[in-house]
Amino acid sequence: MSAALSKLGTSVLKKAKGLITTADVAFGELTLTGPASKVVQALTVLRDEFEFQQVIDLCGVDYPDRPLRFDVVYHLLSLTKNLRIRLKVQADEDTAVPSVTPVYPVADWFEREAFDMYGIFFSGHPDLRRLLTDYGFNGHPLRKDFPMTGYVEVRYDDELKRVAYEPVKITEFRRFDFLSPWEGSVYGPLPGDEKTEKRAGDA
């Protein structure tokens, strides 16, 4: 299988010269990379020349220490060849990635999700709005610099008879005083602990 994927990667590099720059096989999967500005042309070649008819998923990955902090990853499926590959491009916070909805219309909501969760912009998208968070939501929850507790908390106010938004008041993680088999107990010996103590006559 790896040999077949390597051969496919070589063919893709030859056919999509400049559009796709690297092809690597790892863990039985083929990963292609290329410049973000050419992603529409690259996916058009993969669809028309190599029969990858479907985008199964499009997701973001955040590397905050890199200048191009985001990877945009396209997972493709060929129904005729029964093969899956991925294409990765890199983007920063300010430069938009071209929308691939002209090539794969199903990418519409995938791109909206990546915009909502990571703040990745897609130029030419027909309706780039938040998808999973509220309209007034501040920030992008899957970025690694987004606080675990968020910025606001939501509750229903019975006096106002509406949903109320308030700033998060918790400044550190709560430590619940529940029994944990990994951390041990602060309550002293538990039933059964006596079995670990050596008694007279034990070997």
Image: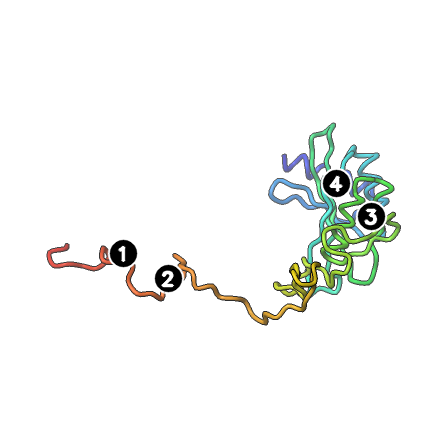
Element class at badge 1:
loop
The first of marks 4 and 3 along the sequence is 4
Q: Residues within 10 Å of mark 2 (few under 14, many from 20)?
A: few
Identify which residue, 95 or 167, lies in the foreground: 167
Q: Can you give x and y, in whole percent of width and height, for residue 131 in the image? A: 76, 50
Residue type highlighted by circle 4: Thr
Q: Which mark is residue 191?
A: 1
Residue corresponding to mark 2: 184
Judge whether 179 appears above or below 16 on screen: below
Residue corresponding to mark 4: 10
Q: CA distance from mark 1 to mark 4?
A: 64 Å
Judge whether 177 appears above or below 14 on screen: below
Image-quadrant location for residue 133:
bottom right
The first of marks 3 and 1 along the sequence is 3
Residue type highlighted by circle 2: Gly
Judge whether 67 appears above or below 1 on screen: below
